[in-house]
Amino acid sequence: MLCAVGDLIEDLVVQLHDDVRRDADTAASIVRRRGGSAANVAYFAAKLTGRSRFVGNVGADALGDSLVARLQLAGVQVCGERAGRTGSIVVMTGRDGERTMLTDRGDALALSGFDAAWLDDVSVLHIPLYSFAGEPIASSSRVALQTATARGIVTSVDLSSVTVLEQLGTRTVHAMLESLRPTVVFCTAAEAAAAALSPDNTHGVSIVVVKDGAQPVTTFGPQYPTTTHGIVAAEHVVDGTGAGDAFAAGMLTEVTTTGTFNPSDIARGVAAGARLAREVVGRAGATLEGS
């Protein structure tokens, strides 16, 4: 079972029908979705395998109640804490599918500890870099990764955002990776450049997976040859929200079925991740429901 640690928040997805007109009306379609990178990965994993686990601090409010109920309905076990206010993100998507995000994480950073029991029956632990961007969740996430590694659980980190990488600083990110040594790191080409990850230096990471939109995916690691994986591009893009999370869930659930990583597993995992991401971008928000 996959476990993800981080945010469960609301996405307010705004699909613009025209360019934004300042001080005037702009036609748009607006939907509310369950969001948060970690919650998205847990959701997609549950849709693929029937169950998963999410750990985080969710606001003790009606919005938090609603988001928890939606995750549970999808087969996700929700663990962690309930305190403070649930956050929201306004995701504005232009006609070309490109996104602008206005982020209010509420009290998602307030996860104050990690119970080792939350890793029971877990085969892979996934944590977005967002979960290292503030305290106390950063300390809780470190404990989670250290505990998972000690148990022999596959661990995964998504670099999440160039903005977060810039806020943390390259040295801090390198020190974190070299200390925690995750099995897999997911990143975009821009994030890999910002974090200075390359085949010559993965900073302790076993496998780096570099995505580049509709372009081929590149994988490399100390024990794995640099490999380019062609992918099938989506024919119709509505919204890119959650595509990276879907890719991570698709790849991780595929490759951890055998409990090992080898070149054939990686190729199969990339294909599974790209297939799920392709399905998600045809919908508004990080979901497999609706159209």
Image (cartoon, helix red, strand yellow):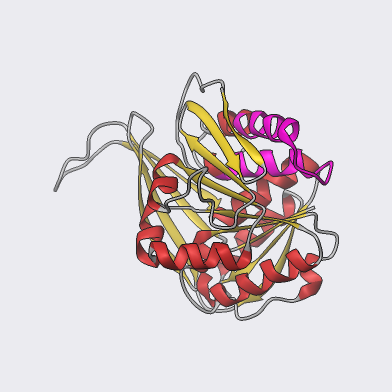
Relative to 65, does residue 266 appear above or below in the rendering?
A: above
Q: Is residue 11 visible?
A: yes
Relative to 149, does residue 12 appear above or below in the rendering?
A: above
Any magenta on residue 256? Answer: yes
Residue positioned 62% across, 71% down in the render: 142
* Residue 163 picture location, percent across and down: 36, 56
Residue positioned 65% across, 61% down in the render: 68
- How many marks the image carries: the answer is 0
Relative to 267, does residue 127 appear above or below in the rendering?
A: below
Any magenta on residue 206? Answer: no
In which quadrant of the rendered view does residue 148 lie?
Answer: bottom right
Part of the protein shown in magenta: 245-274
Q: Is residue 291 visible?
A: no
* Residue positioned most to the front: 200
Residue positioned 57% across, 61% down in the render: 8
Residue positioned 67% across, 43% down in the render: 223
In which quadrant of the rendered view does residue 37 lie?
Answer: bottom right
In the image, taking residue 78 as reference, residue 38 lies left or right, namely left
Would you say the magenta stretch is mainly helix, strand or loop? helix
Image quadrant in which the C terminus is located: top right
* Residue 88 picture location, percent across and down: 45, 60
* Residue 3 picture location, percent across and down: 72, 58
Q: Nearer the viewer, residue 202 or 68?
A: 202
Q: Nearer the viewer, residue 142 or 226?
A: 226
